[in-house]
């Protein structure tokens, strides 16, 4: 039998001195008895996976609306894939993989339906009521909205996981594990959005071929394989691109750890410079890839049509709920006293999957749809 204390000692023996150890966690908001067989971060990970918000990621848009096709990434598949990337980086750097996994699995919980269009729509609607931003919404979910325990609101996650979810917060207490998740996320969505864009036929291989990173990958493939099948070539290219970015990130971060003499977690907080990052050359190439995806994929007319439809659905539902709150489900209406009408409506819509939002819109606006 392996008890929690044994796992904590393994961390002390194996992890780098600058990694965050489970036994040194700053704890939870509400005191709980420690688990016999799981560390605090393993427990956080499991709470996240078993949450309603995590399950809803299966039917939330990454770039393509769920019903556009079976093989495009959803928020759930993106989350799972980026978690693997982040854990690979963490393992190579001897970081706390359980902490990385918990942050990574929770990082997209706050996204509403219809991708970034949903966030933009909700932020506009909430402009006079505190705004909306998916990272802050993620914290609302894990700290308040999830309702699974009798002794406290939310999931009562550890301080380190909650801080790791504050991606754009200047007051965030940084950790090397949280920064690895941020960069793992960037690698995942650049590679996977490129893959999905090619799969959907929205990106042309001739245009992709002008991107420097893809040129490097393509030259390597052609040097090793004679006339590979085009579909196989794309899959190989995405894998190699991912490996290229992960390898560069690990190499540059290792150099920075030595350069800034990071020997304990607090050294990372005080470094005052990027530690987890790409090399200067690769950083420029990643920026070029980002510009390409922005111009050719995210602004493609078919993607814009999908996202604009999503925005309209959200705006119309929001206005109906606010103008006639009696149409809100009982559990949502009960939160208006504590959070205010606009925030309660925002929380409700942000929690919807694409599929539920489409059905709910039909129930509200289609005269022959059953309510």
Image (tube, rainbow, N blue to C red):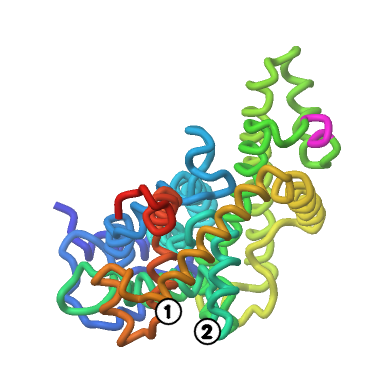
Q: Residue 226 carries which label?
A: none
Image location of residue 364, percent across then percent down: 40, 59
Q: Which mark is residue 130?
A: 2
Q: Main secondary structure of the magenta part?
A: helix
Residue for point 73% across, 19% down: 224
Quadrant of the rendered image containing residue 41 = bottom left
Residue for point 51% across, 68% down: 134
Estimate how packed mark 2 is, as few (under 14), some (14 to 19) or many (20 or more) residues with alpha carbons within 10 Å.
Answer: few
Pick the front one: 11 or 276: 276
Name the secondary structure under disc 1. Answer: helix
Image location of residue 3, percent across then percent down: 18, 59
Name the secondary structure under disc 2. Answer: loop
Is residue 78 toward the left or the right of residue 43 in the image? right
Is residue 298 toward the left or the right of residue 80 in the image? right
Image location of residue 252, percent across then percent down: 69, 57
Where does the C terminus fall, quadrant-wise? bottom left
Is residue 240 toward the left or the right of residue 130 in the image? right
Image location of residue 310, percent across then percent down: 55, 55
Q: Do residues under tags 1 and 2 come within 8 Å of each other at their CB atoms?
A: yes
Pick the front one: 229 or 332: 332
Estimate how packed mark 1 is, as few (under 14), some (14 to 19) or many (20 or more) residues with alpha carbons within 10 Å.
Answer: some
Pick the front one: 294 or 337: 337
> How many angstroms separate mark 1 from mark 2 (CA)?
8 Å
User: N-terminal of the two: label 1 or label 2?
Assistant: 2
Pick the front one: 4 or 103: 103
Q: Does 132 appear above or below 128? A: above
Residue for point 51% across, 34% down: 69
Q: Which mark is residue 343?
A: 1
Quadrant of the rendered image containing residue 280 = bottom right
Q: Which residues are drawn in magenta?
A: 205-209
**Residue sitting farthest toward the top:** 226
Is residue 299 toward the left or the right of residue 270 in the image? right
């Amino acid at each position: 039998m392996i008890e929690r204390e044994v796992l904590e000692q393994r961390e002390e023996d194996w992890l780098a001195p600058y990694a965050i150890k489970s036994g040194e966690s700053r704890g939870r908001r509400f005191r709980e008895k420690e688990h016999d067989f799981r560390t605090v971060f393993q427990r956080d990970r499991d709470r996240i996976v078993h949450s309603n918000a995590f399950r809803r990621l299966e039917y939330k848009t990454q770039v393509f609306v769920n019903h556009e096709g079976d093989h495009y990434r959803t928020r759930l598949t993106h989350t799972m894939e980026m978690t693997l990337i982040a854990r690979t980086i963490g393992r190579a750097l001897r970081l706390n993989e359980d902490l990385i996994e918990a942050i990574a699995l929770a990082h997209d919980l706050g996204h509403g339906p219809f991708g970034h269009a949903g966030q933009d729509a909700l932020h506009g609607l909430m402009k006079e009521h505190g705004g909306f931003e998916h990272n802050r919404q993620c914290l609302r979910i894990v700290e308040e909205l999830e309702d699974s325990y009798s002794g406290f609101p939310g999931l009562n996650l550890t301080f380190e996981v909650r801080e790791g979810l504050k991606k754009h917060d200047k007051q965030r207490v940084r950790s090397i594990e949280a920064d690895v998740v941020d960069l793992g996320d960037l690698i995942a969505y650049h590679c996977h959005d490129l893959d999905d864009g090619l799969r959907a036929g929205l990106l042309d291989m001739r245009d992709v071929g002008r991107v420097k990173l893809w040129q490097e990958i393509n030259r390597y493939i052609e040097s090793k394989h004679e006339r590979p099948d085009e579909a196989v070539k794309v899959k190989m290219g995405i894998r190699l691109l991912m490996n290229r970015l992960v390898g560069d990130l690990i190499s540059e971060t290792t150099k920075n750890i030595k350069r800034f003499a990071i020997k304990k977690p607090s050294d990372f907080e005080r470094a005052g410079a990027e530690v987890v990052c790409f090399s200067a050359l690769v950083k420029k190439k990643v920026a070029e890839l980002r510009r390409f995806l922005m111009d050719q994929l995210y602004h493609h007319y078919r993607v814009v049509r999908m996202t604009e439809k999503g925005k309209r659905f959200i705006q119309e539902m929001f206005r109906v709920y606010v103008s006639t709150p009696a149409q809100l489900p009982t559990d949502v209406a009960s939160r208006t006293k504590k959070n205010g009408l606009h925030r309660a409506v925002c929380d409700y819509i942000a929690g919807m999957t694409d599929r539920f939002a489409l059905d709910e819109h039909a129930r509200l606006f289609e005269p022959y749809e059953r309510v």
